[in-house]
Image (cartoon, rainbow, N blue to C red):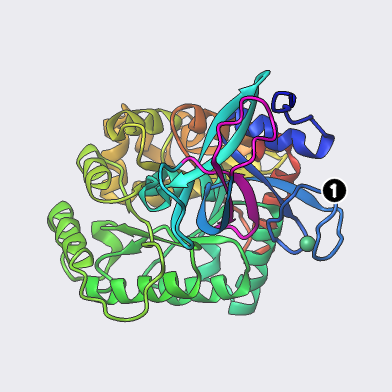
Amino acid sequence: MTATRPIPLRYPEDVEHLDGAARGELRVPVCGSCGEAFWPPSPVCPRDFRRDVEWTTDAGTGRVHSWVRFHKRYFEGDDVPYVVVQVRLDSGPNLTTTWTGSGDPVLGEPVAVSFREVGDGVWLPEFGPGGAGVNPSRELAARIGPVGVWLSVLAEVPAAEAAKAAQVVEDLGYGALWIGESPAHKEIFTNATLLLSATTRLTVATGVATIWARDAVATEGATQTLGEAFPGRFVLGLGASHAEAGRGNGHDRPLTALREYLDVLDSDRYQGPRPDRAVPRVLAALRPRMQELARDRTAGMHSFFVPPAHTAAARERLGPEPLLVPEQAVVVDADAARAREVARKHVATRLALRNYVNHLRALGFGDDDFADGGSDRLVDELVVCGDPQLVAARVREHLAAGADHVAIHPLTGTPGVEPVLDQLRALAAEGGIRS
Ligand SMILES: [Zn+2]
């Protein structure tokens, strides 16, 4: 009689994958040099033979590439017949696994991962139908990982410099690049197109595209254009911005305006080529009612200018599924006084905007905190000044409070993109900052 089915051995190159499976995560190696995910695990990239292998948490979705039904009982206890399926992950590589579906797989059908203990505490991924049914917020959270970057400077520097900066962000391993929009700088969808074109795997998110800048029909067309051209790499962040943004198309009733805007986006009038999977939308949301709209109508929310306490309250309101992405301003600088000065300038600019002041009042700050560009307490709550370890600690605070992804926003006292990138390099070198 044949032996019982053996348990996989823990070869060194498989440990990351097996430990991930035990936690319910599909961990897949990615080449740091060419950016391609590959399978099976190996210390070298199968495409360019570089020894620059990193690991990423895969969204665990893909499509059936091939399958076969086994009738022979190779091991005692095999429940024949059983189906083995080869899944092409959305991230690229093919994975051969057990099929959990009740019927036969259909070539090309969308699938999602689940995990099963096969004995001795060893867990393995398996796949069944349902990729299309995976919660898009959770899928997005897995795709962009816990740490990204928020850069306003890319709207202000020449395209060649911005492209190079986006490549640095990608190479440093940040999961997403959030870009801003202001009436005095680059148009955000055009800029997103340039940055997506300049990179190969980085997710680019508008953080945020203001609804007063273009009507919903134009936004929908731009979103579908980018989603189709750059599958899985674009996120639409929308917001009502603030009353002082100076566009002059009326800022009363931002909630109603956003609701109506989403109605148009949902109306399905776009007839051009679409991405396989809908581009995720998030809303800029500081106050409770906007957070509820984000929860009810989109993949989640993006918050800006918030301490971890705000993140905790937002998570409570959202519930477990919606995406929660706070921006975190930082000044990585060993000179504490200089850093504080840069931070206070950033805070002072926003204290001139009514919606930020109202939001901070709701968090318990008062007039004393708003005087003279912001009290030390206020500045410290909103901007982390100091070494990379301090920034890593604040990122972890947001994550512990319920954030899925923290968009790090380096502030500098000098113009241009290099001082910003220097901070991002210092942070990437700090172990605690990345997954
Ligand atoms: Zn490679």
39 to the left or right of 12 = left
| Quadrant showing the C terminus | top right
Provide residue 184's location: percent of width, then percent of height: 40, 73
User: Is 117 or 224 nearer to us in this picture?
Assistant: 117
Provide residue 245's location: percent of width, then percent of height: 29, 63
Provide residue 195's location: percent of width, then percent of height: 56, 71
Visible in this render: residue 118?
A: yes
| Quadrant showing the N terminus | top right
Q: Mark 1 points at which residue?
A: 43
393 to the left or right of 102 = right
**Which residue of the protein is positioned furthest toward the front in this rendering?**
1
234 to the left or right of 202 = left
Vertical placement of 399 versus 30: above or below?
Answer: above
Provide residue 140's location: percent of width, then percent of height: 46, 50
In this rendering, the count of numbered labels is: 1
Q: Is residue 148 magenta?
A: no
Residue, x 45% and y 27% (percent of image)? 401
Q: Does the magenta stretch include residue 94?
A: yes
Vertical placement of 272 versus 363: above or below?
Answer: below
Visible in this render: residue 186?
A: no
Q: What element carries label 1?
A: loop
The part of the chain drawn in magenta is 71-100
User: Is 239 or 390 nearer to us in this picture?
Assistant: 239
* Amino acid type, label 1: Pro
**Which residue of the protein is positioned furthest toward the top in this rendering?**
120
User: Is 55 or 361 nearer to us in this picture?
Assistant: 55
Q: Ligand 1, what quadrant?
A: bottom right
User: Is 124 or 245 nearer to us in this picture?
Assistant: 124
Q: In which quarter of the image is residue 320?
A: top left
